[in-house]
Image (cartoon, rainbow, N blue to C red):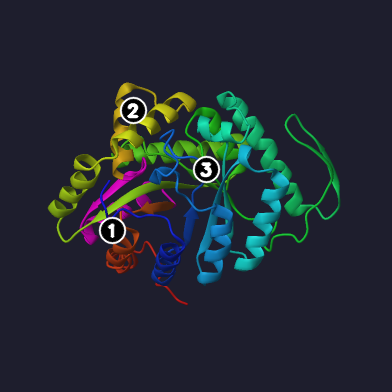
Amino acid sequence: MVPEAYRPSWEASVKTAQMADALGFEAALAYARWKGYILGQPAHPSGVVLDPFTWCAGIAQATRNMTVIATSHAPTLHPITAAKQSATIDIISGGRFALNVVGGWNKPELEMFGAPLAEHDARYDHLQEWLEVIQRLWREPEEFDFDGRFFKVARGSSMPKPLQQPGPPIINAGGSDRGQRFACEFADVCFLILRSEDTAQIATQIAEYKQMARRDYGREVQVWTYAYCVQRATRAEAEEYLHHYSVVHEDTASLDAWIAGVGSQTKIFSSPEATAAARRRFAAGAGGSGLVGTAEDIAARLDQLSAAGLDGVLLTWVDFEDGLDRFAEVMPLLEARGLRAPVAF
């Protein structure tokens, strides 16, 4: 791991969030991690993560325009608590909150909560009930009873309600068939891992996702992906730095643990080739696709992804402050291509 790699801290969070807000980014997402990938090493960087709900409440006060997105693994938080915290942040932010819901996959992490990892599809059944309780608490003015397989709620209510009605947007990343169906039925934004870098294949993957939502659930959804950004003055410099941090200085222990955990607990790796590709992407940027090159290269690639039907991209950098500073060159190029409207505060 290179020394300039981002380390979570409140000071760094505020600085980079305010930089992103000033540049016109639409949202900042706080991921959830309760235990790192390396067992027996609690101080390993993979497990040093600020609480996402608390982070969102604070960042909402430090910014003016962008949405704050909290990630929650359903087995780690009761839905009544999640509903109240979400509504509170939505009020604090003036209606700038969204919730990224996850069924849970990190076995040691869930066992720490006394919540043994359930079978893959059962985790989505649990997540569905969890989300239903939350959304009813957001929407319903009167008390209600809920008698589910996983949750029992007697005279449930939660006040005050979130500003956004019928509730804050829901985000979910479903990779398996069951996961995709959950996202299409319940999420407003569906995250996917692109199976290919070929634009035509990407367009097909996105179209299939949106068609499933439309055909099977009568819903229109947005489809986003996740990308690591390596921007330099020349493409050669960008590729050299990518190799430097992801190959020469790879975090081998984290890579091994992440691949083993995700591979055994999810269904997103369909072949050894897919696993090897995921390992390379994780080393480069936590499993995302690559935006590598000059500002113009990155703008051109985002243009291609937009033309393929993608609605949004969650970006990450090795060094967030440096990355955002460089990305300021990309924003006007996106405006010139008609991909963004000029920022107006």
Q: Which residue is mark 2?
A: 275
**Which is more toward the observer, 300 or 171?**
171
> Is disc 2 in contact with disc 3, using a CB cutoff of under 8 Å?
no
- Give the spatial CA distance, label 1 vs label 2: 28 Å
Does 121 sit left or right of 29 as displayed? right
| SS class, disc 2 | helix
Q: Earlier in the sequence, mark 2 or mark 3?
A: 3
The reply to whether residue 105 is in sight is: no
Circle 3 residues within 10 Å: few <14, some 14–19, many ≥20? many
| SS class, disc 1 | helix
x, y percent for residue 319: 31, 57
The reply to whether residue 275 is in sight is: yes
**Which is more toward the observer, 195 or 62?**
62
Please say if 196 is above or below 49: above
- Residue displayed at 71% across by 42% down: 132
Does 150 sit left or right of 238 as displayed? right
Amino acid bearing label 3: Trp
Magenta segment boundaries in residue numbering: 285-311
x, y percent for residue 238: 19, 53
Amino acid bearing label 1: Ala
Q: Earlier in the sequence, mark 1 or mark 2?
A: 2
Please say if 52 is above or below 338: above
**Magenta span has 144?**
no
Mark carried by residue 299: 1
Nearer the camera: disc 1 or disc 3: 3
Please say if 114 is above or below 244: above
Mark carried by residue 34: 3
